[in-house]
Image: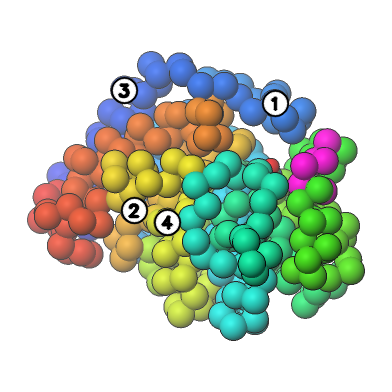
């Protein structure tokens, strides 16, 4: 980790150079299938890095709120593993990459479980478990735990929630398919409503980097010292992010970037360098997989420059950044 003023300066310059370089990239489209998301400014762009001991390096629009969308999925998955245990959770969702789009209407042959908790079907199954466990208090409970992971109080964006509730027919179909196969229980509509609210939690690019840094720091928020997720479930969360977090781009991502990550259709990306760093980016221009175009390039470039890829021969774990900065 950067220690001296020169190293800190070098890290900040790197983040600024990433922002300046990829600001030029204007490929990709803002999501419109949730009508409210189409109001995003396509040029918004933020890059933030938070070290596992809480130092922040950022550039661009790091304070601008946007909805977390699918980046909520690894955290709700962590919550159910934490609260209900592996055995119960794996009765409802598997951990196999699907190779399909995030909103595919499909379940695993034989078990009828969703392929993994990062695609919509799996995430809805996970959220239904939280709803079954906490009932009417589920949203408050989720917001409390997400707030601990982020290190500040989070709220939901009512307009985005209502927009998705009105138009989320595909997710409604998925929820009812899960109900049909007994993967979610009778309150499928209430669980779906909770899922829409979870996707509408407002975050900033800095929040995302902090949440990623909490994962990098074994579930403990680097600045508040509070436990956001139990240490045992962090490994599960990072494994599924590594294999499934970028949907049908996950293989390419593992090859190019090589760290656990998750994207959201509002334009956020989180990436976790285990025991070292949390990365958050925000840019609403998406590629055809629903991943932020600039987010992918920034993470890929950072991974190359800092040797972050988990299999990079230079990556010798938590001491690596010490040796280069
Ligand atoms: O369920 C949906 O379609 C959205 N609320 C979230 C999808 C999403 O973020 C996919 N990620 N890139």
The image quadrant where one finds ligand 1 is top right
SS for callout 3: helix
Tell me residue 323's x, y (percent): 10, 56
Can you tell which of label 4 and label 3 is closer to the viewer?
A: 4
Mark 2 vs mark 4, CA separation in Å: 10 Å
Residue at the disc numbered 1: 32
Q: Is residue 41 above or below residue 257?
A: above
- The residues colored magenta run 167-172
Q: Are marks 1 and 2 in contact (CB under 8 Å)?
A: no
Return the residue nearer the eye: 294 or 116. Answer: 116
Return the residue nearer the eye: 194 or 49. Answer: 194
Label placed on residue 243: 4
- Of the two numbered discs 4 and 1 on the same chain, state the one appearing first in sequence: 1
- Of the two numbered discs 4 and 3 on the same chain, state the one appearing first in sequence: 3
Q: Is residue 175 left or right of residue 268?
A: right
SS for callout 2: loop
């Amino acid at each position: 980790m950067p220690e001296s003023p020169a190293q800190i300066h070098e890290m900040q310059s790197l983040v600024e150079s990433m922002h300046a370089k990829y600001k030029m990239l204007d490929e990709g489209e803002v999501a419109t299938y949730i009508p409210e998301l189409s109001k995003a400014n396509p040029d918004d762009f933020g890059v933030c890095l938070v070290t596992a001991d809480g130092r922040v390096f950022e550039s661009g629009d790091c304070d601008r709120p946007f909805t977390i969308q699918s980046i909520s999925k690894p955290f709700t998955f962590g919550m159910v593993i934490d609260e209900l245990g592996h055995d119960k959770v794996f009765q409802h969702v598997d951990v196999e990459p699907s190779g399909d789009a995030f909103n595919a209407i499909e379940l695993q042959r034989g078990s009828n479980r969703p392929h993994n908790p990062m695609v919509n079907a799996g995430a809805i199954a996970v959220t239904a478990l939280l709803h079954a466990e906490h009932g009417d208090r589920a949203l408050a409970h989720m917001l409390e735990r997400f707030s601990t992971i982020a290190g500040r109080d989070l709220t939901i964006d009512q307009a985005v929630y209502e927009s998705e509730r009105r138009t989320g027919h595909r997710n409604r179909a998925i929820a009812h398919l899960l109900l049909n196969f007994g993967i979610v229980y009778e309150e499928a509509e209430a669980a779906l409503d909770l899922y829409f609210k979870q996707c509408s939690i407002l975050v900033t690019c800095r929040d995302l980097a902090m949440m990623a840094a909490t994962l990098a720091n074994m579930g403990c928020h680097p600045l508040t010292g509070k436990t956001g997720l139990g240490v045992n479930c962090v490994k599960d969360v990072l494994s599924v992010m590594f294999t499934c977090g970028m949907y049908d781009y996950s293989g390419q991502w593992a090859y190019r970037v090589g760290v656990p990550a998750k994207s959201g259709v509002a334009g956020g990306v989180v990436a976790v360098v285990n025991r070292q760093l949390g990365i958050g980016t925000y840019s609403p221009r998406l590629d055809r997989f629903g991943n932020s175009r600039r987010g992918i390039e920034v993470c890929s470039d950072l991974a190359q420059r800092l040797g972050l890829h988990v299999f990079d021969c230079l990556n010798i774990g938590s001491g690596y950044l010490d040796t280069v900065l």
